[in-house]
């Protein structure tokens, strides 16, 4: 059985909702990330051209209107040959990490020796839709009601029929996570992300998007994450009103992740293939795991996935140097840290989705990309990436720096 290794990991900057990447369709965002892998490691480009990439596995949640198989679109636009296999997967916010998990499983099982895995999402370009084929809902005359694809299929629980923000309010109340705690943690995210950006900590993982690639003649391009607000403080965030429960809620626009656009991709291979290509791996994939809870308790799921995946890797909590826990909401991240006994100082040391943004199909690959690069920068040995996802699951992975 071959141990899967990561040869390279790149991501686009995360664009704000209606920001600099707002005119770029999702598959193109994915193609820019894949092309970034090829630019950094020309041997990967040569492998693609010679048919050595067994599969391209990319996550995308909001697929309506994108055309057939967005992952294959991304692969071919990045320069893969027409013979290239590709598959698009949807595991909500865990899609990008699930893609890497599937690539790793194929390599461990001997079904593949080299794959590209990741995810992409343009939340800005998500369309509206109308249910006109279901008979009872089709109007015979008069106005028609449209649904927001992003909200309906990306940000709304199919079981509880409420917004993810309502679930965050629920978890905050159930686990006694105060508004002040949430605002403090959110300010921390912005301040860490601003510091990381100013010091160039993201430089190794980023693929700048040119003005031409932004499909906007007036655009100067996007070279840094757009959502970071360095001036954010707990006091300034405390002034914002609750969004989902005006009377008793504690979740605001300031202590929730941002609606965003972006793409990320990783090259995953067997050690034998890495040696054949002459590429030194940057990390080994030690273990991965999916946990499940009731849909209502979605934001507790990572607190179960993290210890489970660490145990699966034969390790203990203290063996982990860095954690990238996706910040869907501050309440969720704080609950996971609290129940999991995770030292906050090791969590999201360059900020998280509250500051950077959360392009849902991309984020699983984004947190893993950031993790492997920050392990290298800090000299850390092992790290865990984890995300909750709609419906009550969470995905997690343990990696070890090479």
Image (spheres, rainbow, N blue to C red):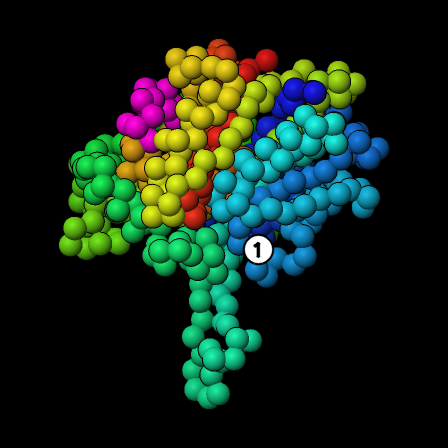
Q: Is residue 213 left or right of residue 94?
A: right
Which one is in front, 32 or 375? 375
Q: Which residue is mark 1?
A: 63
Q: Residue at x 64, y 31 (%)?
A: 105
Q: Picture quarter containing residue 225?
A: top left
Which of these two is toward me, 45 or 213? 45
Tell me if residue 235 comes above or below residue 204 in the rendering.
below
**Point 20% across, 49% down: residue:** 249
Q: Position of residue 180 (x, y in %)?
A: 18, 36
Quick check: is 316 in the magenta stretch?
no
Image coordinates of residue 102 in percent, x first then y, are: 62, 35
Q: How many dots with numbers?
A: 1
- Work out which residue is located at the far bottom of the displayed protein and give it: 141
Name the image quarter holding the N terminus.
top right
Figure check: 380 above or below 136 = above
Q: Residue at x 51, y 57 (%)?
A: 125
> 257 and 132: which one is in front?
132
Looking at this rendering, what residue extends furthest in the right direction?
50
Image quadrant where residue 354 sits: top left
Q: Residue furthest left?
A: 247
Residue 170 is at least partly visible in this image: yes
Q: Position of residue 240 (x, y in %)?
A: 21, 47
Element marked by disc 1: loop
Measured from the top left, where is residue 401 in percent x and y?
A: 55, 15
Q: Is residue 305 above or below residue 170?
A: above
**Which quadrant is home to the C terminus?**
top right
Magenta region: which residues?
336-349
């Amino acid at each position: 059985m071959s141990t899967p290794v990561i040869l390279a990991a790149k991501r686009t900057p995360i664009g704000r909702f209606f920001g600099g990447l707002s005119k770029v369709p999702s598959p193109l965002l994915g193609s820019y990330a894949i092309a970034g892998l090829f630019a950094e490691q020309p041997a990967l480009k040569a492998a693609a051209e010679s048919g050595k990439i067994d599969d391209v596995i990319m996550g995308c949640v909001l697929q309506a209107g994108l055309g057939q198989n967005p992952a294959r679109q991304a692969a071919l636009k990045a320069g893969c040959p027409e013979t290239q296999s590709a598959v698009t997967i949807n595991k909500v916010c865990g899609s990008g990490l699930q893609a890497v998990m599937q690539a790793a499983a194929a390599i461990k099982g001997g079904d593949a020796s080299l794959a590209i895995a990741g995810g992409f999402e343009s939340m800005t370009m998500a369309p509206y839709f109308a249910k006109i084929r279901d008979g009872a809902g089709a109007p015979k005359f008069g106005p028609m009601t449209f649904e927001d694809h992003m909200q309906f299929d990306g940000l709304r629980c199919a079981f509880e029929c409420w917004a993810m923000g309502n679930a965050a309010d629920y978890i905050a109340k159930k686990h006694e996570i105060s508004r002040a705690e949430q605002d403090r943690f959110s300010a921390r995210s912005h301040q860490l992300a601003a510091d990381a950006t100013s010091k160039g900590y993201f430089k190794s993982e980023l693929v700048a998007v040119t003005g031409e690639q932004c499909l906007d003649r007036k655009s100067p391009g996007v070279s840094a994450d757009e959502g970071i607000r360095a001036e954010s403080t707990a006091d300034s965030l405390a002034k914002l009103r609750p969004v989902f429960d005006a009377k008793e809620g504690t979740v605001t626009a300031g202590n929730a992740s941002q609606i965003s656009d972006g793409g990320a991709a990783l090259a995953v291979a067997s050690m034998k293939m890495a040696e054949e290509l002459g590429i030194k791996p940057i990390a080994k994939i030690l273990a991965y795991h999916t946990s499940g809870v009731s849909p209502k308790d979605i934001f507790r799921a990572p607190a179960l996935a993290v210890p489970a995946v660490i145990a699966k890797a034969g390790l203990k909590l203290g063996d982990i140097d860095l954690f990238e826990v996706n910040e869907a909401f501050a309440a969720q991240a704080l609950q996971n840290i609290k129940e999991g006994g995770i030292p906050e100082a090791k969590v999201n040391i360059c900020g998280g989705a509250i500051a950077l943004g959360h392009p849902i199909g991309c984020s699983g690959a984004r947190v893993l990309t950031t993790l492997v690069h920050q392990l290298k920068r800090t000299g850390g040995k092992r790290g865990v990436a984890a995300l909750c996802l709609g419906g009550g699951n969470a995905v997690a992975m343990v990696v070890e720096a090479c």
